[in-house]
Amino acid sequence: MRKIGEFLKGERLKRKFTLSQMEKETKIKKQFIVSIETGQWGNLPEYPVVSGFIKTIAQTLEIPENIAIAHLRRDYPFDRKKILINPKPDLKLKSTLSPRIVAIVSTILVVLAFLGYLLYQYLQYISPPKLIVKQPTDNQPVKVGEIFISGETDSDATLSVNNQKILVSEAGEFFDKIEVGQDTKQIIFVARSRYGKETEVVRNIFLKDE
C-alpha cells in the first residue's frame, strides 16, 4: 500500500503540477512539500500543522480530505505522551453512603457493564459489516483503465475490491481507483469484520467505446 507521500506525489504528477506550482497554489514552502512526499517527518512541524498542510494539498489536487488524512494518520510516527494526573485534587468529596451500599452499587454496575460488553461482542460477532457502494453504480458504462470507487463500511472492517485491498478511513469511508481491463465484467466489493463476517456487493459494468 502506498505511503501518504507517494500517494500525494502520484496525484501531483498526474495533474502535471511542479513543486514550484504547488508552492504557489498552496502557500506551503517547497521543502515542506518535498519532506511530505518523501516521508521525512523530522523536517516538518508538529502534527497539527502537517495535518493542515495535507488538507490544503488535498484540496489543490482535488482529493477528498478524509482520505488524505486517513493516509496521514496511518503513516505519521506519533510519539506517545504520558498523561499527568494531579495526585492531590483540590476538591474533597465526602460520601454519605455506607460502605455496604457502595459495595452493592459497585457490584451491580460491574455486572451490568460486563453483561453489556458481552452483548456488544455478541452482536459484533453475529453481524456482518455494513457496506454501501456509491461508485460505480450498477450497470455503469466504463472505459478500460482506472475507475473511481467510493462508499462506506464499518471503520474497523477490512475492504477488498476485486481482491485488491482498499484503505478505509476512521469515519468508515473509502475512495480509491482500481484497474478495469477488457475482460472485467463485475466489480466485487467485500467487507470483512474482525470476526470474519462478510458483506459482499457486486456492481455489474460494461465497457464503452473510447
Image (spheres, grey):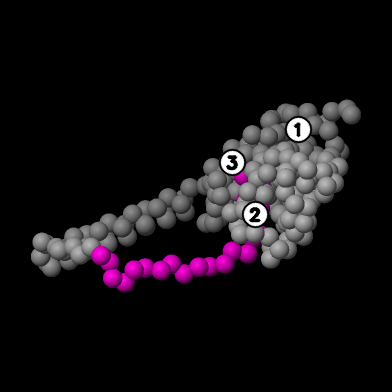
- The kind of residue on which mark 3 rests is Glu
Start-end of magenta stretch: 66-90
- The kind of residue on which mark 1 rests is Ile
- N-terminal label among 2 and 3: 2
Say if the magenta span includes residue 132: no
Residue 72: x and y, percent?
65, 54
Residue 84: x and y, percent?
41, 69
Q: Nearer the viewer, mark 2 or mark 3?
A: 2
Visible residue check, residue 147:
yes
Image quarter hosting the N terminus: bottom right
Q: CA distance from mark 2 to mark 1?
A: 39 Å
- N-terminal label among 1 and 3: 3
Dot 2 falls on a residue whose secondary structure is helix
At 62% from the left and 39% from the top, the residue drawn is 151
Visible residue check, residue 14:
no
At 27% from the left and 56% from the top, the residue drawn is 112
Residue where numbered disc 1 is placed: 205
| Majority secondary structure in the magenta region | loop
Q: Nearer the viewer, mark 1 or mark 3?
A: 3
Q: CA distance from mark 2 to mark 3?
A: 26 Å
| In contact (CB < 8 Å): disc 2 and disc 3 | no
At 78% from the left and 28% from the top, the residue drawn is 141
In the picture, residue 116 is in which quadrant? Answer: bottom left
The local crowd at label 2, few if under 14, some if 14 to 19, many if 20 or more residues have their Cα within 10 Å, is some
Residue where numbered disc 3 is placed: 152
* Left or right: where 20 falls relative to 194: right
Residue where numbered disc 2 is placed: 50
Q: Nearer the viewer, mark 2 or mark 1?
A: 2
